[in-house]
Image (tube, rainbow, N blue to C red):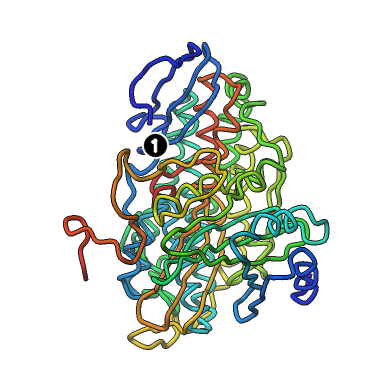
Amino acid sequence: MVEEIGTTTEGDLIINVGPQHPATHGVLHLVITLNGETIKKVEPHLGYIHRSIEKMCESLTYRQFIYVTSRMDYLSAHINNHACALCVEKGLQIEIPDRAKVIRVIMDELTRIASHELWWGAMAMDIGAFTPFFHAFRERETINDIMEETCGARLTMNYFVPGGLMADLHPDFQQKVKSFISLFKSKVDEYDELVTGNVIFRNRMKDVGILSKEDAISFGCSGPTARGSGVSCDIRKLYPYEVYDKVQFDEVLETAGDSLARYMVRLREMKQSVRIIEQLIDQIPEGDFQAKTKAVLKLPKGEFYTRVETARGEFGVYIVSEGGTTPYRIKFRSPGFSNLSALDHMARGSKLGDLVAMMGTLDLVIPDIDR
Amino acid sequence: MLNEELKASISNIDETVSFDETGEWLTVMVNPGGLNSLAKGLRYDEALFFDYLFCLTCIDWKTNLTMVYHFSSTRHRHNIVVKSVLDIKDPQIETLTHIWRTAEFHEREVYEMFGVHFLNHPDLRLLILPDGWEGKNPMRKDFEDPINMIKL
């Protein structure tokens, strides 16, 4: 590992970005080899926030381990919980009540909006625009308040459990989500007007960090990163879970593969999430919010894999069970890990200043990468 | 493609593989030595076309290490699992980095966490563990750390 600033034998400069750097949004450490201002190589060094969650889960029961997963991709906490709950339900062959299914999807989409909003604000700030951050956080705060009322937490919700939901909805939930949605619809257009058309912004984003369709697939990219390159990979469309096959929404695709394309995908995805919530918010069926499950869950011997679409891409949970109360081996396929592996390829040959735009549009969440 | 068709096509590439259909997806068991040629077939055969490696991991079964690869095709939308059993005393397997670029990072993770050596890997170094890490591999079942590990 190269720790110090120095020069290589060819006279190239080696610099460190991170682990403490405002543009990495977490403890990501990049060792960059530069020729003048041109990037020759980007080497990520990980592990600054590695908690070995997979190992930890091997000693936790199927009810306990879900709580740990909120701490991985903390901006998609609901969706991480969702994947784990689905995987345990698949093993136990439990059918959850319709009410729980619909609430899960609404919560997922609210999470997606909140995550994309944080990304939008933070990325614009990286590029040099400070105001969008306040705009994004103003709306995100409303979602956090809605979550807090129902789930009791603002960030690591732990609301989904095997068999359904932890608790029923707060009585104000529907009305508050509706008023948020009606406000938010105009706000997305406002975001668009505020930033997208800006000449400086477009110059910083257009043709920066181009990832071709073939490379995106080869690097295992997923989510908005791959969809910006024209790869159709939305798990909600391809392998629908819960009620995603019953709602109308479009998979957002761009073909340019540059930073602007990835930006546009996320911006348009927020509108699709609004569409999904609008269809479901008045259609929450009455009934139980939880299926009857045993107090101690035991998965049958075998292997179970579920895939869901988080705000960052495809999140997979792979449980290997020996028939006990704890998983024998558990693997979390995190979208950020694969997306990060494409950074070196994208960055080679471009200027150091553009690296910030690339990292911003990859939407890296470091605890998700390190796990 | 249906499981039967997949089995026929894969048998054409490598006759020695065995199949397991108990799981959600078709599982192919391959010898470590045959992985490279099988992988090339899976990736470049037009009818199979498994271009997306979405999960690469390893399981420590105490008596052996099992590599698990999950493949998907973005064209045909079928999925497959490939497994290969490695000797726990000297785990070695060919890298897949030259076919799927995402394998580079995933194999580095498996290398440090399980101690599997990937032959012909372009850059097999520690990725997550700190520099100068010595001793056993953390994800192995026999790993003990009296200071940092809390037994429940």
Q: Is residue A295 above or below residue A181?
A: below
Residue at the (60%, 37%) spot, across then down? A263
Q: Is residue A167 left or right of residue B71?
A: left
**Residue B121 in the image: above or below residue B52:** above
The answer to which of A241 and B71 lies nearer the viewer is B71
Report x, y in % for residue A349.
61, 21
Which type of secondary structure does the marked residue at label 1 adopt?
Answer: loop
Q: Position of residue B12 (x, y in %)?
A: 80, 67
Chain containing the residue with disc 1: A
Which residue extends farthest left? B147
Residue B55 in sight in this render: yes
* Residue drawn at (67%, 69%) of the image: A245
| Disc 1: CA contacts within 10 A as few (<14), some (14-19) or many (>=20) | many
Location of residue B58 with respect to B105 vertically, above or below: below
- In the picture, measured across the screen, residue A12 lies left or right of residue B70, that is left
Q: Position of residue B49 (x, y in %)?
A: 76, 57
Residue type of the residue flagged with mark 1: Leu
Nearer to us in this view, B115 or A33: B115
Q: Quadrant of the N terminus of chain A?
A: top left
Q: Which residue is mark 1?
A: A28
Left or right: residue A324 versus residue B12 is: left
* Residue B44: x %, y % from top left: 77, 52
For the point 47% across and 58% down, the residue is B91
Q: Residue at x 60, y 70 (%)?
A: A241
The mark tally for this picture is 1
- Residue extending farthest to the right is B46
Residue A217 in sight in this render: no
Residues A30 and A354: in front is: A30
